[in-house]
Every structure is written in C-alpha cells, then in structure tokens.
Image (cartoon, grey):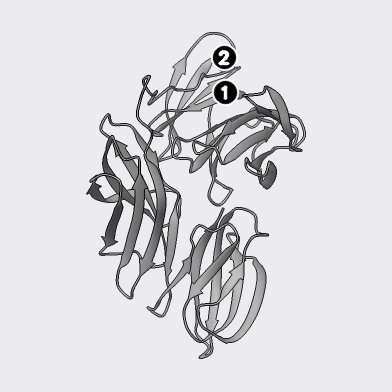
C-alpha cells in the first residue's frame, strides 16, 4: 500500500500487506487503515502513525471491499467468492459475525448512523441491506446489471468558517468496591450539546446508560451506579447542537471474581500499564483467544507496572495472582 502526503503529492511510505490488495478503508479517527487482500483471504490492519501492519484478520474467500463503521468499532468486508460479509470487531481484531448476502458481493458502505450496511452484489443485480445490530439482511433492493460499488455516505459536512471541533483531552475510569467513576476533560467545546455515556460487556455492542449536559470546555464526571460483573467497557458519544456526534476511545475495567475490584491504567495503553493492587505475586498477559503471552513473577508487589509496547493492538487480560493464592483478572486495550 502506498501512503501519499496530500500536501506535497509524494509517496512517503510503502507498507507490505497481503497478496493482491483490493480495497482500503480508514478508521474515522485516522489511526488505522484496513486493506483487504483478495488472494490472501485476509485484512491487514495498519497503524497509520508507524505505517506498519499491527494485525492480520482472516476473512472469507476473495475479499474485495471494506468499510469501517462511523464509530470505528467494526469493519465490514465483502467476500466475493463466499457470498457473504465478514464483520470485524476492530478492538479485538476478530471476526464476530458472518452475514450471507447476494451473489458475488463487491462494494460495501455503512450508513452515517452506523445502523445499516449496504452491499452491492455483482451477479445478483441487487443490494443487500444489513442491520448492523442483528447482523442480518433486512432488505434486498433490485438494481441495474452488475453493480460493483457503493459511494461513501456523506454526513456532518462542516460549513465554511465553522468552529474548531471538540477536543477530548482525556477520558479515564477509576473504581472502588461498588462503583465505576468516569472522568473526562475537553477543549474547543463551542457547539457541544451533551455527552452520552455508553456501556458494553464485550467491547462491541454498546448501550446508553447516562447523559451529561455540556457546560463548556472543562472537566466532567459520571458514576455508573450499577456496574456489570466481569469486564465492562465504556465510551463517550459527544453530541453537537446540530445532531452530529463523535465517539471517544474505549476504556475498560474488570470486576474480579472475589468481589475486589482491580484496575489497570492507563487504559487503553500504548507502552506501559500499571496494576492497582497489593501483595501481587505473578501477572500473566492473556490475549483475547485465551493464550498466555507472558508471565512475570513479582513475589509481593504493590501497584506493579509492565511493558506492553511489543503487543499487537487488541483486547488483553491480566491474570493476577496474589500471595494468598487468589487469582483475578482485569482487561485492558492495547493501542
């Protein structure tokens, strides 16, 4: 894949991806690019800062089209020879659903609100409409002969001389034995109407649990009075006065099996994470498939830190054993 600087119109990087790259889509925040490899039957996930492949996701046969959802949590891949669409969770870089569509799907595009995905089927001469919540086809629209592509939806186009967009300076979570406390700080908050707090048990399907009115650039907080057991994921939906919105990064915390709450910070992290806790004897890093990546013996540590800079982007769990033999776990997201 060639990376072009659009100011100088020069190629500034070349990234090796899978065999026969066919389609590409960039995440809404610009941090990731997704390249489908038609003869490799996979998707290369590229970190746009380092211009390196950080993950490779196996999909269906002969993938040719790809589109990332507006919130950046899912990527939809049209598999030409499989007659289906692979749905990728972009946090864990895993296929979470496979949706049967028409014959020889080629182009794919996601609606601005993220509720529908549209797939052009070359041989069927139709478009499959996918409900992105149920991952099922809810309509089939007959069109002309051999439809190949779908244009990108255009939404929230700024008017000339518009104000600067809201800047989310920080978003973090702190926990006690009963509650999860979310805190965030903003700047350039000229047209912001409110913040919707959304929660998920798996990092994919999010539900609104609270709303905080905007007050101008500054600090905010929200407490989840009934946090879920196990891993809990949160994100912010920043809503403007014109109805447009953007999503924050995802943060997570885990309720340990013995009722005590462990926390890891910063979360997400790019290089180093710290575990808040006492009398920690060993820490194992476990990937989202359950495989132990590394084990660190600490004897009797308090708030230990460990490097995660060499881990590929995705969701991980820290399996923590204390000196009394109790084993708990806490999840984190590696950027």
| Image vertical order of residue 179 relative to residue 167, above or below | below
Q: Is residue 245 visible?
A: yes
Q: Position of residue 180 (x, y in %)?
A: 33, 65
| Image vertical order of residue 200 relative to residue 298, above or below | above
Q: Residue at x 51, y 17 (%)?
A: 126
Q: Residue furthest top?
A: 144
Q: Residue at x 35, y 54 (%)?
A: 184
Q: Position of residue 313 (x, y in %)?
A: 60, 53
User: Is label 2 in a helix, a strand or a loop?
Assistant: loop
| Image vertical order of residue 162 relative to residue 231, above or below | above
Number of numbered discs visible in the structure rendering = 2
Lower position in the chain sequence, tag 1 or tag 2: 1
Q: Position of residue 123 (x, y in %)?
A: 60, 17
Which quadrant of the figure has residue 98? top right
Which residue, given by chain and number where applicable, does mark 2 sit on? 147
Which residue, given by chain and number where applicable, does mark 1 sit on? 107
Q: Nearer the viewer, residue 231 or 165?
A: 165
**Is disc 2 surrounded by few (<14), some (14 to 19) or many (20+) residues within 10 Å?**
many
Q: Position of residue 335 (x, y in %)?
A: 56, 53
Quadrant location, the N terminus: top right
User: Is label 1 in a helix, a strand or a loop?
Assistant: strand
Q: Is residue 78 visible?
A: no
Query: Horizontal placement of 236 versus 38: left or right?
Result: left
Numbered badge on residue 11: none
Q: Nearer the viewer, residue 7 or 296?
A: 7
Separation of marks 1 and 2 at Cα, in angstroms: 8 Å
Q: Nearer the viewer, residue 94 or 293?
A: 293
**Is disc 1 surrounded by few (<14), some (14 to 19) or many (20+) residues within 10 Å?**
many
Which quadrant of the figure has residue 188? top left
Tell me, yes or no, whether the two marked residues, 1 and 2, touch with CB atoms within 8 Å.
yes
């Amino acid at each position: 894949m060639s990376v072009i600087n659009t100011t100088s119109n020069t190629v500034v990087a070349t990234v090796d991806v899978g065999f026969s790259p066919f389609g590409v889509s960039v995440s809404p925040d610009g941090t990731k690019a997704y390249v489908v490899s038609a003869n490799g039957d996979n998707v290369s996930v590229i970190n746009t800062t380092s211009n390196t492949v950080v993950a490779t996701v196996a999909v269906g046969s002969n993938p040719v089209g790809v589109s990332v959802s507006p919130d950046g949590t899912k990527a939809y891949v049209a598999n030409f020879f499989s007659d289906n669409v692979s749905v990728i969770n972009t946090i864990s870089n895993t296929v979470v659903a496979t949706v049967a569509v028409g014959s020889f799907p080629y182009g794919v595009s996601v609606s601005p609100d993220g509720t529908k995905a549209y797939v052009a089927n070359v041989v069927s001469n139709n478009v499959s409409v996918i409900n992105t919540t149920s991952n099922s086809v809810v309509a089939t629209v007959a069109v002309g002969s051999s439809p190949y592509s779908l244009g990108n939806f255009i939404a929230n186009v700024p008017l000339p001389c518009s104000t600067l967009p809201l800047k989310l300076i920080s978003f973090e979570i702190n926990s006690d034995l009963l509650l999860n406390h979310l805190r965030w700080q903003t700047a350039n908050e000229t047209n912001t109407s409110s913040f919707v707090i959304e929660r998920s048990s798996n990092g994919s399907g999010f539900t609104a649990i609270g709303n905080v009115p905007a007050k101008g650039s500054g600090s905010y907080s929200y407490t989840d009075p009934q946090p879920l057991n196990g891993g809990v994921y949160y994100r912010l939906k920043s809503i403007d006065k014109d109805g447009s919105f953007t999503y924050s990064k995802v943060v997570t915390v885990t309720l340990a099996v013995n009722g005590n709450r462990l926390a890891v910070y910063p979360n997400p992290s790019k290089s180093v994470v710290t575990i808040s806790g006492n009398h920690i004897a060993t820490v194992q890093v476990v990937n989202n498939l359950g495989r132990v990546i590394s084990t660190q013996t600490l004897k009797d540590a308090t708030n230990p830190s460990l490097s995660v800079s060499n881990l590929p982007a995705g969701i991980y769990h820290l399996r923590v054993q204390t000196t009394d033999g109790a084993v708990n776990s806490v999840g984190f997201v590696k950027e």
